[in-house]
Image (cartoon, rainbow, N blue to C red):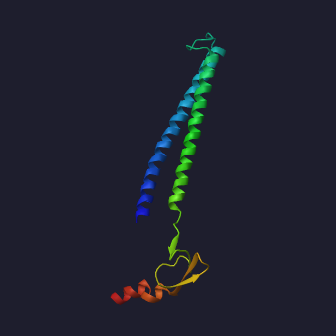
Amino acid sequence: MEGLKNQDEFVESKKEIHKKYSRLIQIIFVVGLIVVLWTGIVFSGILFWGYAYAWAGLNLDTWLLVASIIISILIILEIALYFRYNDIEREKAEIEKPKPEFIQGKRVHAFTFPKGVEGGVFSKTYVEMDDHNVLRLRALMVHPGELWGSREEQNDSEI
């Protein structure tokens, strides 16, 4: 039960982190877009509109250097967010990994036939494979429909 509680808490925290990272990625994109647009405006002001070389407070070379630095920082932040999100995914995979079951110090490997059947009567047979492993075979002996009949038969008998 505690594993389920930890898994639910992990899923909730993952959703919060995903929302936070999504917002940060959007902010990084908008800031990068603004920097690129501003650099384009400065360049077009000099080239097409005939403004002075330093009309925007700094000259074009300095604006290109500032834009390159800001975009480099934004790319590094994006990569860091990507790797952090992958770490969270890896942690989730570790939590969801089934924990091995042991009986008398031996690892149990379970096999159920047929797969996906709920209810009914199953037989459990344990077969020792070696000194460290046991195979648990679960075989369906009585189908759930044979035990309780179909739902329609039950409803007809109640009327």
Give the left or right position of residue 52, taking residue 24 as reference.
Answer: right
In terms of depth relative to the viewer, which is nearer, 52 or 127?
A: 127
Q: Please report the residue visible at 43 percent of the width from the left and 53 percent of the height from the top.
A: 12
Q: Position of residue 129 (x, y in %)?
A: 61, 80
Residue 103, can we see it? yes
Residue at horizontal 45 percent and vertical 59 percent from the top: 7
How many numbered callouts?
Answer: 0
In x, y percent, where is residue 13? 44, 51
Residue at the spot 55% in from the left edge and 49% down from the top edge: 87
In-front residue for pair 53/88? 88
Whether residue 112 can be seen here: no
Q: Relative to 35, is 48 above or below?
A: above
The quadrant of the image that shows the C terminus is bottom left
The residue sitting at the right extreme is 47
> In the displayed structure, does residue 93 sit left or right of residue 7?
right
Quadrant including the N terminus: bottom left
Q: Residue 73, image x and y in percent?
A: 58, 31
Residue 54 drawn above or below residue 130: above
Q: Residue visible at 57% across and 38% down?
A: 78
- Most extreme residue toward the left is 159
Q: Is residue 75 above or below residue 16?
A: above
Q: x, y percentage for residue 110?
A: 55, 76
Specify the quadrant of the image occupied by residue 35.
top right
